[in-house]
Amino acid sequence: MFHFLLRGIWRLLLGIDFLFFTLFMWLLAWLPGLAGSRLYFLLFRRWCMSFVRALGVDLRLHQHYPDRLPERYILIANHPSAFEDIGIPALFPVHSLAKAEVAQWWVVGRISRAAGTLYVHREDKDSRRRAVEDLVAELERGRSVALYPEGGCKGRRVHPFRYGAFEVSLRTGVPIVPVFLHYEMQETFEWKDQHLLVKIWQFLTAQNPRANYHVHAPIEPRGFADKAAYAEAVHRRYLEWQERYLD
C-alpha cells in the first residue's frame, strides 16, 4: 500500500513538472530568436521525454547492430500509435515529418512548429512533393529527419510503404535507419478511431506500459535501382520484424 502511494505521488509530481515545462515551452515558442533554433530543438527533445515520463511509459531502446548511428540519417518506423510522435524525438535527434493538422493543435502545435517539425497534407500529391523537397533541404543542412513510410497511423500491422523516404535517400545518398516499434500492450497503444485525449488516458492507465523501439542497421541507398525497389526491400524487412516481434 505504501509503495502504491509513493508511486502515485511520484506520478503526480511528474505530471505537474510536465505541465509547467509545457507552459515554459509554449511561451518560448513566441520568441523569434528561439523559435527554430538549436537550443529550442534540444529543449523540445527534453520536453518529449518529460511527456513520456508523465505518461508513465517505460520506453526502451534496443540496438541490433554494433556501430554508432550515421552522422546524418533518415529514420523510418512503423506507426501503430500516437505515442511515437513523442517517443521518437525523445530518443533520436531528428526533425519529424508530421501531418499538417498537428501544426494547428492547441499549445502542442506551436511547440512543434518552433521545434522545426516538417508538415505534409498526406492526401495532397503536391504537398507530398513539397515535403520531399523539405526533407532534402533538412538533410543538406546537416540534420537528420524522421518519417513514417506507411503514410499515417495504420495500426499494429505493417502496411505498404510510400516512396518518399526512399526517393530522398537515393537523391541525397543519406542512409535509412529502420526502427521497428513494439508496444507490449498492443491493443491499448494502437490508435484506431479514439479521440487523442482518450488515447492519452489509455497510456496513463496501461497495466504494462512498455514500449520497445528496435533500431536495426542503417541501409545504404547504393545498390537499389529505384525508389520502388528500395521501398520493397525495406518493407520485406519490416514484415520479418513483424513476425519476430508481434507474431
Image (cartoon, grey):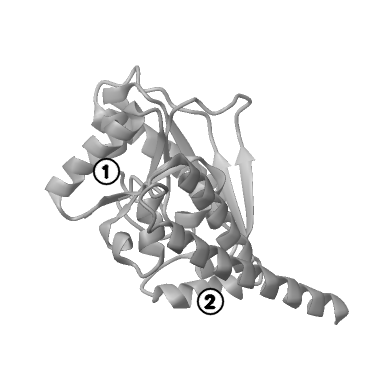
Spatial CA span between label 2 and label 1: 31 Å
Amino acid type of the residue tagged 2 in the rendering: Trp
Place of residue 35 in the rendered image (x, y in percent of width and height, measured from the top left): 39, 50
Question: Left or right: where does residue 57 sit relative to residue 78?
Answer: right
Task: Residue 130: name its quadrant.
Answer: top left
Residue 54's place in the image compared with 90, above or below, is below
Q: Is residue 118 left or right of residue 59?
A: left
Left or right of residue 95, residue 246 in this image? right
In the rendered structure, find residue 201 and report the number of the disc placed on it. Answer: 2
1 with respect to 201 (left or right) = right
Which image quarter: residue 162? Answer: top left
Could you say where residue 153 lies in the image, as x and y percent from the top left? 36, 58
Residue 28 visible at all? yes
Say which amino acid is labelled 1: Arg
- Of mark 2 and mark 1, the one earlier in the sequence is 1
Residue beneath label 1, please?
162
Residue 239 occupies quadrant? top left
**Residue at the limit of the structure toward the top, as seen here:** 223
Q: Secondary structure at mark 2?
A: helix
Q: What is the residue that sits farthest to the left in this orientation?
A: 126
Residue 195 placed where, x, y %?
39, 76
User: Which dot, 2 or 1, sits closer to the camera?
Assistant: 2
Q: Which mark is residue 70?
A: none
Query: Residue 200's spot in the image, x, y percent?
Result: 50, 72
